[in-house]
Amino acid sequence: MRDTFELWEGRGQFAGHETFPLRLLWLKKSYDAVRGGVPIGTFHEPEAIVRFGVGRNMAVSMRYWATAAGIIHDSNSALMPTELGDAIFGDSGTDPFIERTATLWLVHWNFASEPSLTTTIFFAFNGISGTEFDVASINNELSAVVNARGWRAAPVTLRRDIDVFLRSYVRRDDIDVEDAAEPLLAELGLVRDMRPGAWFEFVRGPKPTLPNAVFAYALGQFWQRNYPALATLSAEQICYAVGSPGRVFKLDEDSVVNHLMRLEELTGGVWAWTDTAGLRQVQRRGQLDLMQLLLNAYPPRPQRNRRRVA
């Protein structure tokens, strides 16, 4: 746990969501709002209530989640779509209404693999030892990190952020009608409510709905962020390092290896898995366009019904 933020020099972010978990159409609405570039205060203006059909706090939350999900970003004091945002939500987007589980895995990856905006989610998936936890334990561990690193976060702020994390990932039976479509990321089955509202468990093991291309995209980002000069990565690094696909997707070692064995075909031989004399690693023989690689997670398919929106 002490090494969770060892390689990161930023400051923890425990607010910005206004206590609202991500909702289904917020990413699409946020993307549409910033196409072509808009002023930085677009989501804070009084007009945002009319533009988005939600209260001001929800509009602010929409911007926070869309930024954390990697769909929009601040560019020279203007809000703009990212390349990922264009790929998913643009005119020829792969999944503008989030009908495919691949998009949910991407959103989760962006929340849990990098701590800048979603520090609690990053810590939960990378810093909690073992698979079971309760609210008190994660609160105590996060508080210790905040104090040790000299960050500023009031106890009530931490508690609210932990609550939003759980409401984002855990399907609950006690939600009200207004929140009936939540939580969006519960579909991934990453966190299980063992005793309602009291004890939780990470579900570690195979993830049948995780596309190989999303895993490969995540591996490419992990490689670039942490080991850009290395031509090889070990299976151990990919399984267990902070911010790795193995940790973030809660995969067991066999499941990680199953994804790694498909890399050579998926990347046209640019990456290759080797298992020789007990040395298990991925070799990188050249550069890849990760966005082009990611498109393999979105093969064309017949029109289907959209997700239900409450």
Image (tube, helix red, strand yellow):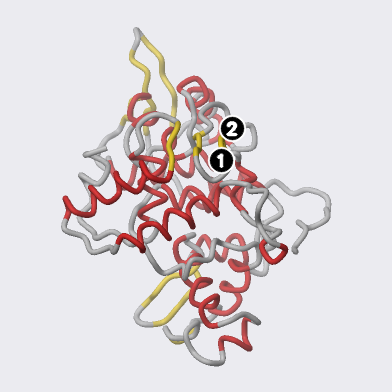
- The structure residue drawn at horizontal position 30% and vertical position 46%, both measured from the top left corner, is 140
Work out which quarter of the rendered image holds the N terminus and state it.
top left
17 or 10, which lies in front?
A: 17
Badge 1 vs badge 2, beta-carbon distance below 8 Å = no
> Residue 72, image x and y in percent?
48, 69
Residue type of the residue flagged with mark 2: Lys
Query: In the image, residue 104 lies at what x, y percent?
Result: 59, 50
What's the CA distance linking mark 1 and mark 2?
13 Å
> Of label 1 and label 2, which has the lower sequence position?
2
Kindly identify which residue carries mark 1: 213
Point 28% across, 59% down: residue: 12
Q: x, y (%) of residue 24?
A: 65, 62
Q: Amino acid at mark 1?
A: Ala
Quadrant of residue 274 within the rendered picture: top left
Crowding at dot 1, Cα within 10 Å, few <14 / some 14-19 / many 20+, comes out as many
From the viewer's perspective, tell me whether residue 289 is left or right of residue 105: left
In this view, the residue farthest toward the bottom is: 46
**Image quarter (top left, top right, bottom left or bottom right) of the C terminus:** bottom right
Answer with left or right where residue 35 lies relative to residue 173. left
Residue, disc 2: 207
Using the image as rendered, state which of residue 84 and residue 10 is in the foreground. 10
Expressed as whole percent of the image width and height from the top left, the position of residue 245 reads 44, 37
Disc 2 crowd, CA 10 A, few/some/many (<14, 14-19, 20+):
some
Residue at left offset 53%, top offset 66%: 20
Q: Does dot 2 land on a helix, a strand or a loop?
A: loop
Residue 6, placed above or below residue 149: above
**Residue 2, quarter of the rendered image:** top left
Say which element carries label 1. Answer: helix
